[in-house]
Amino acid sequence: MARYLIRRLLMGVTTIFVTTIAVTLLIHLVPGDPVQIMYAQSQGTTPEQLEAIRDRLGLNDPLPLQYLSFLGRLLEGDLGQTIRGQQPVLELLLERLPNTLALAGAAMVLAVAIGLPIGFLAAYRRGSWVDSTLMIAAIAGVSVPHFWLGLVLMFVFAVNLGWLPVAGTGPANLILPAITLGLSNAAIVARMTRSSMIDVMSQDFVRTAHAKGLPKAMILNAHVMRAGLVPIVTMMGLQFTYMMGGAIVVENIFAWNGIGRLAIDAIFQRDYPLIQGFILVFATTVVIVSLLIDLAYALLDPRIRRSA
């Protein structure tokens, strides 16, 4: 198992390394002069000031030197400063990151709490009207865009009923964004759970357990659920990554102060150091979550521990 985790750790480090290269190249992929684009909305900026900014950002250096300089600053925990306000990029991102993780985590808990029982029930009653009804609801849930669902929930529960706040950051403000992000993902979890459970129920070891006369509840809990959770855990890792991306839209709908909203502001302001930092922090977070999912996968599946 140690070799398995070391391999996954090396893959994660490689992913982050490739991301640092992509982040360095990002500012050079913009057509035209990136500094002029960043300061296009600023009035009265002289050519001398623009040249000083290029020197500060290191854009006059050769590209390999720019990358090595960026990597050296990164190892020191320095992602530069924002164009607007001259704030440390890393400090600003780490200040907002817990809010995004809280939103994605709450949505994941909601998706699992709803999706797993629905998927398991649909698999247990497969072919019945219960199965058909639940899967139709799941397909409808997957088809609903986040922005539309978020606006509907906001209109009903915040504007009309006044039960929840419209926007902001706080415990009460988390409810509507988490529901918006979690419901569609609950539908995906339900469909995946149904497929996985049906596949496990048809395996030889389950039929053998039935032939031995074991109680149905014991078979479902001790055999079907444990074996069926392995692919579901893998899928949940991918879903969490998807939720981190979906949080960008949801955060802007509900004015939730996460890194997604910060990234959109950085794009509109053409703040490339902040955009670069967002990409790197986002990718690192996804890699760490993937490593944790791989660990859970290894703990659930004994075959991985033996092969490792």
Image (spheres, rainbow, N blue to C red):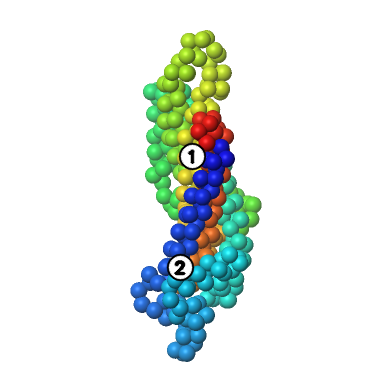
Q: Position of residue 14 (x, y in %)?
A: 48, 54
Identity of the residue drawn at 42% across and 21% down: 202
Q: Quadrant of the N terminus?
A: top right
Can the viewer see residue 153?
Answer: no
Check disc 1: other Cα within 10 Å, few if <14, some if 14-19, many if 20+: some
Q: Position of residue 35 (x, y in %)?
A: 44, 79
Q: Position of residue 116 (x, y in %)?
A: 51, 33
- Mark before the other along the chain sequence, 1 or 2: 2
Three-letter code for the amino acid on which mark 1 is drawn? Thr
Identity of the residue drawn at 45% across and 68% down: 24
| Residue that carries the numbered disc 2 in the rendered image | 24
Check disc 2: other Cα within 10 Å, few if <14, some if 14-19, many if 20+: many
Identity of the residue drawn at 42% across and 26% down: 199
Q: Is residue 39 above or below residue 299?
A: below
Q: Is residue 228 above or below residue 29?
A: above
Three-letter code for the amino acid on which mark 2 is drawn? Thr
| Residue that carries the numbered disc 1 in the rendered image | 234
Residue 19 - label: none
Residue most toward the right? 171
Tag 1 secondary structure? helix
Tag 2 secondary structure? helix
Q: Position of residue 74 (x, y in %)?
A: 56, 66
Say left or right for 151 vs 87. Answer: left
